[in-house]
Amino acid sequence: MSVRPATFVAIRADEFETLFAPESRSALHRIGEVTFGGGEEVVEVPHGVADDFDVLVTSWSTRPFEDDVLTGGRLGLVAHAAGSVRGLLQPDSFRNGVRVTQCGSAAMAPAVAEMAVTMELALLRNLHTHDRRMQATRDWHRAGHGTLGHALPAARHGILGLSRTGLEYVSRIRGLGATRIAAADPYWDRSAAAEHGVELRDLDDVCRESDVFAVHAPSTPETRHIVDARRLALLPDGAIVLNTARSALIDEAALTAELVSGRLRAGLDVFDDEPLPADSPLFGLPNVILAPHVAGGTVEARHAQGAAVVEEVRRYAAGEPLLHEVTAELYHRLA
């Protein structure tokens, strides 16, 4: 487009400051006029937004809206600063001629992968167990002095989903010396996976041969409980399950049973019920590391999300291709 775009930011003020570093805020204002919506908890998208603005910026604090809100004579771009747009936009949104870009997923992928590797290393080296026992007993030997862990390069790695996060995870474990990496993903072929040092396999085979099984796939109706009790049973005794993606990919009840029995270990950042209920049997297990859905939460990831929005708005205004555009075809593959 040839004129400076008018942008409506439907993000709570404190969240905007978290997502947009000072340089990103300045850059957004340089591109065009910026108007902010109000709201202490959530921000409403006004019904006239499609007639009055060229760009709509959304995030976690944007209240979901009906598709007709995007119908108007001016709006051309919705730039989502958080993760998936599926919780905010419906498939019919694309019929209004508005383009959509999802700016949060790629920005958060390195942080999510980093958390998965952090949990893996802690479990392989018994770091969480040593710390808990040492803090509780202050006893050198009861804390596990002399207990041997395992090296990451020696582990057979299996991955569900070569998503952005999955590829970031592969990059990190390969950098730490991993060589035996298999993955299951219906959208990849063997030659493309091999370029990343990954052997593409059937999911059952991946489960059977994984000392570390990492979940990095989107949560869709097709992937719900794709890792069920039968597939969990295929994992070798002592295998580590890492889930920093979405809880629905794994049958949580079946996984909990395996963890309570002590047969498997796990690093979990996502759960069916969030916050995790205080009476969950996952609490207190020596073979489990728990985190409160924070895998993507680093200062750098948040700033990268805001910077991605600014770049997409700049590209849209300049008539350049978008980097993170979501089409109607891609929508159904999103988490």
Image: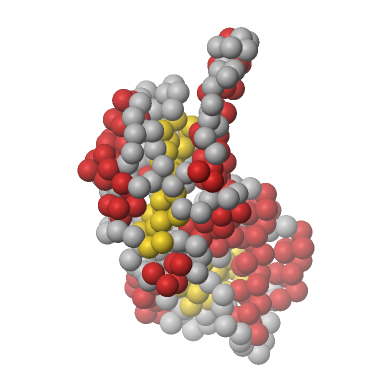
The one of 299 and 234 positioned closer to us in this rendering = 234
Residue at the spot 41% in from the left edge and 42% down from the top edge:
211
- 13 lies above or below 54: above
Q: Quadrant of residue 185?
A: bottom left
Residue 93 position, x and y percent, is 39, 73
Residue at the spot 53% in from the left edge and 51% down from the top edge:
178
- 79 lies above or below 296: below
Is 251 left, or right, of 317 in this rendering? left
Is 237 left, or right, of 298 in this rendering? left
Color scheme of the displayed model:
secondary structure
Is 269 left, or right, of 232 in this rendering? right
Residue 101 position, x and y percent, is 52, 71
Residue at the spot 36% in from the left edge and 75% down from the top edge:
329
Residue at the spot 33% in from the left edge and 66% down from the top edge:
186
**Residue placed furthest toward the bottom:** 2
Residue 91 position, x and y percent, is 35, 70
